[in-house]
Amino acid sequence: MNRTASQALFERAQHFIPGGVNSPVRAFRAVGGSPVFIKSAKGAYVYDEDGNEYIELINSWGPMILGHGHELIHEAVAEAAQHSFSFGAPTRREVEVAELIVSMVPSVEKVRMVNSGTEATMSAIRVARGFTGRDKIIKFEGCYHGHGDSFLIAAGSGAATFGQPDSPGVTRGVANDTLTAPYNDLEAVRQLVDANKNHIAALILEPVVGNMGCVLPEPGFLQGLRKLCDEEGIVLIFDEVMTGFRLARGGAQERFGITPDMTTMGKIIGGGMPVGAYGGKAEIMNWVSPAGPVYQAGTLSGNPIAMAAGQAMLQYLNAHPEVYSQLETAGSKLAAGFNKSLQKLGLDYTVNQIGSMYTLFFTNQTVKDFPSAKTSDLVLFGKYFHAMLNRGIYLGPSQFESMFLSTALTDKHLDLIIAANEDALSEVLSL
């Protein structure tokens, strides 16, 4: 495919934007080559600046659950834009969206709107610390909760070892308050809690991980965390920025039947607009200013355009539960097709899938945590990524990302993706 326009834009961008992109994964560093610059999208397709067409499997990293440019969302945004773009003051729609979220998400009794998933997770941690009077948090290796200082911490060498800053600019003091455990390792969490008795304010995790690729919780893991947090007075936070309203109407917590104390949300509740939210038990959320002493604010929080898009999206999902059975069917078909191709080609790579999230890992190991995900052949994935791109399939440019399906994908689209996957694997393995 000709991508000269994208290449020229990337060269221009590097003179004015750090690395030429406004979010690191977009730079294609993990797969090589130059990023594709998108011009437009509709339904199951995106179109680049050179006019190339791709079947879309990123969907803006999750929010386009109904596909790109859905008429319902478009109409809601157009109507709201007639009344101006921002007020910095309360609006009716903020209340209506909050009521929707509370009615849909099991853990949420009160909710605060913010502008991004990172802002939601940072705020939730601050509230949990204020509520408990404790300083430390537990996070899991490979779970990504945005770029807040508390989350950019690498794992320590033992259960009682403090984390190390994973990025310049993160202070050692912040790192000392962040403890890291392997995902799906309940015993490691118990050891951290025992070694830091009465000092842990919160435990935060993606209930289904999307940021080391799609990784599912093992049976009993989420239940064990819930029990441990109850016993130790720790605030359990589910980061459902990716899984919220995607794996079920009420997110992963509904699907797995585990109710956290707090939930962070984003992506889908903005229908593609920049938005985030955090919510939980009223007794915790009442600590948020101005109801309580924990300060958090945002001039553009509850932006009327974002709220209009989110309201249209959530109302549709609330009224159409068949969306989830459709996505489940699509995800299962794709995973079955991929596994059939792997078997045909004599490969034992791993396909992780739940609902509309999936990842093909280039490893023969069962992927249940970050160390097992890191056994993947990253060079081979890079070749596969470009082979798929050249076949008109737009994937996330990293082995360590989940793909996201939309209801815009038909059986014909899925058949094309499955065929392209088999062809791409055959190509890269013959090189």
Image (cartoon, grey):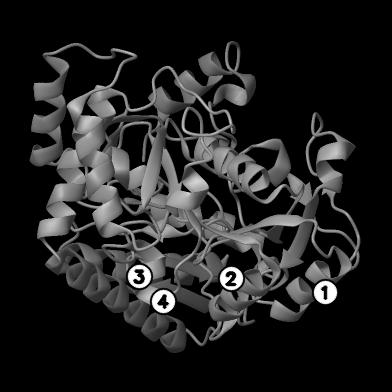
What residue sits 13% from the left and 68% below the top?
A: 322
What residue sits 54% from the left and 28% below the top?
A: 296
Give the CA separation, mark 4 to mark 1. 25 Å
Callout 4 touching callout 1 (CB < 8 Å): no
Name the one closer to the observer, 15 or 7.
15
Vertical position of residue 398 compared to residue 233: above or below: above
Give the CA separation, mark 3 to mark 2. 31 Å
What secondary structure is found at the residue carrying circle 4? helix
Q: Amino acid at mark 1?
A: Gln
Name the spot of residue 35 as percent of width and height, x first: 49, 35
Name the residue that disc number 1 marks.
191
Name the residue that disc number 4 marks.
256
What residue sits 43% from the left and 30% below the top?
A: 115
What residue sits 53% from the left and 17% below the top?
A: 13
Q: Residues within 10 Å of mark 4 (few under 14, many from 20)?
A: some
Answer with the quarter of the image where residue 335 lies: bottom left
**Left/right of residue 177 with respect to residue 82 in the rendered view:** right
Callout 2 touching callout 4 (CB < 8 Å): no
Name the residue that disc number 2 marks.
362
What secondary structure is found at the residue carrying circle 3? helix
**Left/right of residue 208 with respect to residue 66 in the rendered view:** right
**Left/right of residue 300 with respect to residue 229 in the rendered view:** left
Query: Which comes sooner in the sequence, label 2 or label 4?
Result: 4
Q: Amino acid at mark 4?
A: Phe
Give the numbered dot on residue 254. Answer: 3
